[in-house]
Image (spheres, helix red, strand yellow):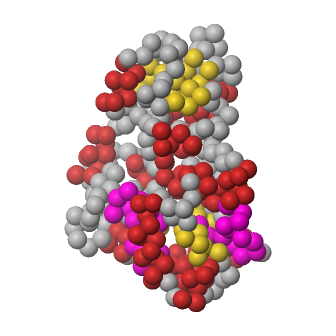
Amino acid sequence: MGVLVVTEIDIRYILVVRLSSIGDIVLTTPLLGELRRRFPHARIDYCTKAPFMPLLASNPALSSVCTPESIPSAAYDLVVDLQNNARSRAMVKGLKAGRACRYRKRNWKKLLLVRFKANLYGQEYRSVVERYGAALGGLMGPVDAPCSLHPSADDHAFAAAAAGGGAPVLAICFGANHFTKRYPAQSFAAVIAAAAARLPLRVILLGGKEDIPEAEKIMAALPDSIRNQVCQMAGSATLMQSAALLAASDLVLCNDTGLMHMASAFGRKLFVIFGSSVREFGFLPWRTPYELFEVKGLDCRPCSHIGRSSCPKGHFRCMREIPAERIAARVVETLSHHGA
């Protein structure tokens, strides 16, 4: 199918809608760059919930960032609904929009994979970024740009002070909204201890205020001799300070979480841990090098497409059987080569 011919005169006002959450919003930024290149003179607004506005506030592709309560009153030639839930559909319906495009979530495929382990995704991986681009139909070509975040100079100065100098920096994004997406705190501590015993290392723990209890478990499980090499920043850094800390890191170890996608915006090498998550859902890192750690062959994976508050089987093998020693060995090997 060819690209539909649309002139800049046709598209002068664009609204992009993605209300939440961190990772999903970051994964929309490649599309924003492509929209700006396709329509260089258009006004492009972005609507999201207030806590996520900092992710977009300095994005050069955007003209403004608003919340659902403060959408500009202009009539839009194009509205791109990348949320596609009841709230966003109702909101878009109330706007003056010449054309509305929506992201197709294909939840029925997820349901079949979770409940019946029927995989209709095929062998070829397709990122959510590509699916976002497909929402625009023939308005433009494929989306190929990387993710994009823009911390301020103050954010970068904050990160530089926290990262220190000399030793390689390992950022660990240990949190996740759901239990089945979280590698155990004791296992993260084992990775840190094994890696720090073989390599001079600066470790930064990143997360939100809700992740502080898990961070405390990691810190408590560490040997006293290496605890001073670990900087616990969960709950202490803003969203964009966390972005700058990821940019200042040499390697990022992470669960399937929004911070993983934030790190991808800076081209960092990622070590990604998948428990209940699977690649078919489309949330592997975009346009950045990564290694995936997972337990293959478990007939209970995936148990959910978003994660669960506990393992429905009670054994949590999808996380417990990922050896901390193997991750630590790869951390040491990767950072040793990085400093060579």
Whether residue 231 can be seen here:
yes
Indicate whether 97 appears above or below 34: above
Give residue 85's position: percent from left, percent from top: 34, 33
Count of numbered tags:
0
Task: Residue at 37%, 18% (x, y): give it.
Answer: 93
* Along the line of sight, the residue nearer the viewer: 270 or 222: 222
Quadrant in the rendering for residue 61: top right
Give residue 300's position: percent from left, percent from top: 27, 62
Q: Magenta stretch containing residue 267, yes or no?
A: no
Image check: 113 left or right of 20?
Answer: left
Task: Residue at 34%, 51% (x, y): give it.
Answer: 306
User: From this viewpoint, which residue is outermost toward the top?
Assistant: 9
Task: Residue at 54%, 44% (x, y): give it.
Answer: 26
Task: Residue at 49%, 52% (x, y): give it.
Answer: 258
* Along the line of sight, the residue nearer the viewer: 24 or 7: 24
Image check: 101 left or right of 317?
Answer: right
Indicate whether 296 appears above or below 50: below
Q: Quadrant of the C terminus?
A: bottom right
Whether residue 268 can be seen here:
no
Q: Magenta stretch containing residue 178, yes or no?
A: yes
What residue span does the magenta drawing correspond to?
A: 159-188
Give residue 138's position: percent from left, percent from top: 53, 22
Indicate whether 98 appears above or below 129: above
Give residue 115's position: percent from left, percent from top: 22, 52
Quadrant in the rendering for residue 249: bottom right
Image check: 240 left or right of 321?
Answer: right
